[in-house]
Amino acid sequence: VWQAVDQGVFLLGQYSIVFIVVLLGTRSPLWTVAVTASFYLFMAVFRFPQVPASRVRQVLHPSGRGASLRQASAVAHRGGGHDAPENTLAAIREASRNGATGVELDLEFSADGVPILMHDETVERTTNGSGSLRHLRMSDLARLDAAAKHRLREKFAGEKIPTLEEAVEECVRLKLTVYFDVKGHPDQAAAALKEVYEKHPVLYNSSIVCSFEPKVIYRMRQSDPAVVTALTHRPWSLSRLGDGAPRFSSPWKHHWMTLLDVALDWAHHHLLWKLCGVSAFLIQKNFVSPDYVQYWSQRGVEVVAWTVNTKVEKEYYQDLLRVNYITDSLVEDCQPHY
């Protein structure tokens, strides 16, 4: 009962904000009521309900790897890109050996539409090849060495770029939770993931689909409402780089992007999460606090922090906040990753 009351108060607060903003902007009670009512109807008709909390707990707090139901989980970023070449089968296996509860993997596509693991739109940073994924077929990508630029390239020499199917099969075999980080291509990604979920039903209880792009998550919920999903967010990402430096030299453009950042942040925290019916919110670690975790907990959403790369930070998130964290290494401290 109290949860229903809290939800009602929350909804009243959201629509009150819309009402006040529109009233101040138009100074017309008629337009204000009309816009607020339209917003309410839009949310009522088009929003997705959250996946049942019991299944979300099963995904985010699996007990199969020696963890209790509410213990924080360590998730290997890109499979653990410090410990092995990122987004490879070797990284997945290494993460499992090092005690990760799950792996975060980036979904991209080759020029001929094959779902693969790759973070960038080009292959230069991580392989011995060059060019855009838009121009490289799977047969081209299969010839590349995914370990070529890694600090442990000799140990992992010859590691290949895996397909999504190969990666999923390995994660299922190792009983790892999978955080699918979708870089874009909403329709293509939703179709590819739906096919994977149908082929591997165990994923409904052992994986989550995440993206910086709300359109991706909304399309995924349209394609399969049973999939657990999350929005990923870094405040001030439009106006500033990960280390806090301004993204643009032009003062005018910087201030404009700052205003857009404010609007985007408000939308993530008050509108988009509810429209998509997400179960988790992946946020850059510097913005996580006990109050922030409580804010989302009141809305039935779990916080996951990224990217946590030092022992001290891991202890803070695991022992004090008790939230899942994504890390580049399971074995040692490594450089900050924004």
Image: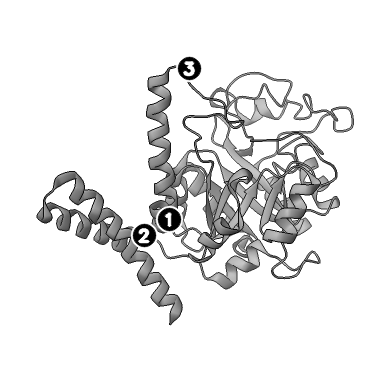
Q: Report, in whole angstroms, how far the alpha carbon at label 2 lies from the one at label 3.
A: 39 Å
Between 110 and 130, the residue placed more toward the observer is 130
- Residue bearing mark 1: 276
Q: Position of residue 302 (x, y in %)?
A: 57, 60
Mark sitting earlier along the chain (1/3): 3
Q: Where is residue 141 in the image (x, y as percent from the top left)?
A: 67, 28
Contact (CB < 8 A) between labels 1 and 2? yes
Identified at 83% across, 45% down, the residue is 94
- Residue bearing mark 2: 47
Between 6 and 186, the residue placed more toward the observer is 6
Q: Report, in whole angstroms, how far the alpha carbon at label 1 lies from the one at label 2.
A: 6 Å
**SS class of the residue under badge 1?**
helix
Q: Which amino acid does label 1 sit on?
A: Cys
- Residue bearing mark 3: 249
Where the C terminus falls, by quadrant? top right
Q: Is residue 120 left or right of residue 270?
A: right
Q: Quadrant of residue 109?
A: top right
Where the N terminus falls, by quadrant? bottom left
Q: Closer to the camera: disc 1 or disc 3?
A: 3
Q: Which amino acid does label 3 sit on?
A: Ser
Graded by Cα atoms within 10 Å as few (under 14), some (14 to 19) or many (20 or more), the crowding at tag 2 reads some
Q: In this view, does 75 lie to the left or right of 48?
A: right
**SS class of the residue under badge 2?**
loop
Graded by Cα atoms within 10 Å as few (under 14), some (14 to 19) or many (20 or more), the crowding at tag 1 reads many
Q: Where is residue 186 in the image (x, y as percent from the top left)?
A: 46, 43
Identified at 55% across, 70% down, the residue is 53
